[in-house]
Image (spheres, rainbow, N blue to C red):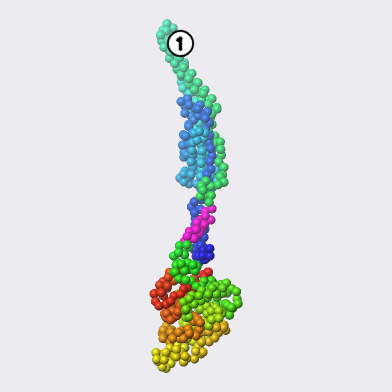
Amino acid sequence: MRVVVRSLIRWVWILVLCVIAGFFGGKQIERALPPTYQAVAIVHLDVQARSGSGNGIPVVQSVAAYATMAMADSIINVVLVHYPDLNRQAISREIVTTPDLNGQNILFTVTLSHAREAASLANDLANVFVAQQNAAIKQGYEKQIKLLNDTIASEQTQIDEFNQKIVQTPATNTIVIQQYQDQRNQVQNLQNQNVAARDNLITQQALYSAPLSVIQTATPPRKPSMVLGTLPLVPVTMLALLMLGGVLIFCLERWSNHINSAYVLQKEVALPVFGTLRWCVPTPHEIPLLAFSELKHPYIEECRVMMADILLQAEKAQARVLAITALKSHAGTSTVAAQLATLLALSKRRVLLIDANLHQPSLHERLDALNNVGLARLLEEARMMKGSVFASGAVSVIDRLAIDNFIVPTALPNLFLLSSGMPSTNPANLLSMPEMEQFLKWTATRADYVVIDCPALAFSEAHILGVLSDQTFVVIDATRDRLKQVAAMKDELTGGRVTLAGLIVNKLNRWI
């Protein structure tokens, strides 16, 4: 869980960008895909009116026919006059008329981004359609009745003409009279049929002149018609981008090879980890070394565990000279070296702490010592001594030096310090002198442990001191170092003569 939280804090700017992009992106999606509301108005066709018109005079049409007529321009244009904001071509796709053959109904379905407007438009379409079609049906009845009346009047004229001809024909001319009577009877039969049809239409007109009616008005829907419309697009978009940001952070973590735990580091590079030092407040270099003997602090306990692991490893390998270095500068090497030496001294062992970081010496400040003389001055004086080193031996050269002028005791029992001094020559040349190796061998016979604070591995002196030491421990800065860099360092050191004992993870859990 800590690894996840650490990763999120490390890449929090990605999550912030995802939130901002999700907010504005959601707003844009809401504008592009607004929620739509569907309103339905239902028009009913009287079945009796439809069945009553089946006498050869198609005054009332079928439901399917009326559903097709409902989308006529004569209806749409009349209704859209009251909706100037709606586009004629666009709105045609949002209006659907569906025939219900079983119920003899016509459904007017309108889908718009505003619920009230959708309901109002559906009702207006239904009402205008009913009004226009009922008026057309009424006109159809009147037209059919007028045509029948005209036909009946024409037939009556023919009948009157035949009666007049019968009267004017001599009674003796029975054949002609019979012909006129037959023709008159035929016309009368047709007239009687037309009269019956007219009376039937008049009855239908009285009963079914308005067969279409709105049986259900549309009400403003409360919920959008589509699932997308029911979703709060801004929060959903923000959540989606946050999830995408989480995936991106996961990929970046895998790609960046951050050191999130000692277990991952040990597993990836196959090197033992002898200490896991978490960042704390107050910072590690602000904790007095004298407080390590009594103060109860989680960081000090971690340092004690580190010391115990290193001590066990050193005793097992019979190592006396321990070099502490790092991949990069400012990894906390000096702090770790001082703490290790302090804890070893507190365990009743004589410890010499050497500040071999001639580029950025700091141990003299931590232990309140002077830096006017030190390792650099010791080596320079050893080199300038008269006599042959090979003839007299390394020990005799070191013995001739006034060691007490260079190695000073500290406020801590059993802990002695050899500060860096101020070199007058290149540090790499100075530490590569034979006198350095002779001095380390000499100190190893007089101290239980020698802890060397080395510069970072970017400097050649670190490699020189690693070769001269019995064991080398590399401080890993969890905030800056990467797994691939540690693996490359391992290959480089193990390929030479450096005895790489293991790693010390520093600044773990520091949020930067």
Residue 269 location, quadrant: bottom left
The answer to whether residue 232 is visible is yes
Q: In the image, is residue 433 part of the stretch drawn in magenta?
A: no
The percent position of residue 455, horizontal first and vertical second, equals 46, 79
Picture quadrant of residue 482: bottom left
Against 57, residue 37 (above or below) is below
Name the residue rendered at 49%, 34% in the picture.
101
The residue singled out by tag 1 in the image is 167
Give me the residue at 53% from left, 31% from top. Answer: 46
Q: Secondary structure at mark 1?
A: helix
Vertical relation: 7 (above or below) 475: above
Residue 88 in the image: state x and y as whole percent: 47, 45
Is residue 238 inside the magenta stretch? yes
438 or 167: nearer the viewer: 438
Of helix, strand and loop, which mostly describes the magenta segment?
helix
Out of 330 and 264, give the one closest to the viewer.
Answer: 264
Residue 260 in the image, given as x and y percentages of width and height:
49, 67
Farthest residue to the top: give it.
172
Q: Write the start and end of the magenta stretch as one range.
A: 232-248
Q: Residue furthest bottom?
A: 386
Depth check: 237 or 270 in front?
270
Between 242 and 501, the residue placed more toward the observer is 501
Q: Is residue 84 visible?
A: no
